[in-house]
Amino acid sequence: IQLTQSPSSLSASVGDRVTITCRASQGINSYLAWYQQIPGKAPKLLIYGATTLQSGVPSRFSGSGSGTDFSLTISSLQPEDFATYYCQQFNSYPLTFGGGTKVEIK
Amino acid sequence: QLQLQESGPGLVKPSETLSVTCTVFGGSIRDTSYYWAWIRQPPGKGLEWIGSIYYSGSTYFHPSVKSRVTISVDASKNQLSLRLTSVTAADTAVYFCARKEIVVLPSAVDGFDPWGQGTLVTVSS
């Protein structure tokens, strides 16, 4: 199952609302997770089951979607949110990741 | 709090075997509520799932490495291991281990969490 993220990169300002999309090549129900990766660090789980916020993750992050179309929204971008974001599907093997979306400071 | 720590050789020659281990701290690799995975990231590129292993011994691998990869668990050392044979420069990457809850109840966390910090393995002569 291929996961296509868009955009591949974006520039935004602190306080902006940012939305990243992830499209699956076939239906994956809600078996989708989102991760945040800061350079030099391991990915961090933000959202699983397409919409469930992982414990400890700020509520400005939210996920939506099911089937083939998903999105991650950051309601008010904070300085610590500048990172690369990846979606991943758990619907079937082989497990796959999207290509990533780099969120940069405008 | 569960922590994972990878260790590896740093440098491997082409055609040789890459071996990386992941030590589990603060929890048991025997816990059958979870399975374990290896994920890699070539420098400057995205994430690629390599394979997963359940404590029962069941394994699943990415087709691109299936013929070259072995994943195993050493419960006595609380370690997860990855072996990749016949490596090429394309196998140069940061190798991460991660844990995944086996989804039985609605409350299960259906994502890789936590991850180790990763270990860079470079394939070069």
Image: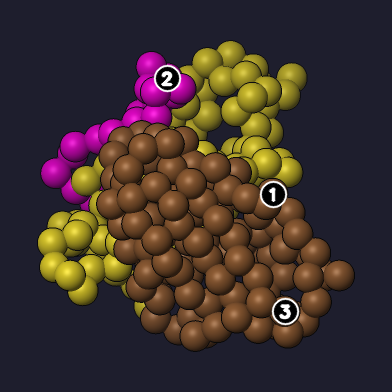
Chain colours: A brown, B yellow
Q: Secondary structure at mark 2?
A: loop
Residue A13 falls inside the magenta stretch: no
Neighbours of disc 2 within 10 Å: few (<14), some (14-19), many (20+): some
Output the chain of dot 1: A
Question: Is label 2 in contact with label 3 (beta carbons under 8 Å)?
Answer: no
Output the chain of dot 3: A
Residues tagged by mark 2 and mark 3 found on one chain of the structure: no
Residue shown at the point (15%, 57%) measured from the top left: B32
Label 3 belongs to which residue? A16
Cα distance in 3D space between marks 3 and 1: 18 Å
Question: x and y percent of residue B86 in the render?
Answer: 52, 16
Residue B79 falls inside the magenta stretch: yes
Q: Quick check: B79 left or right of B56?
A: right
Neighbours of disc 1 within 10 Å: few (<14), some (14-19), many (20+): some
Label 2 belongs to which residue? B68
Label 1 belongs to which residue? A8
Q: Amino acid at mark 1?
A: Ser
Residues tagged by mark 3 and mark 1 found on one chain of the structure: yes
Q: Which residues are magenta?
A: B55-80
Q: Amino acid at mark 3?
A: Asp
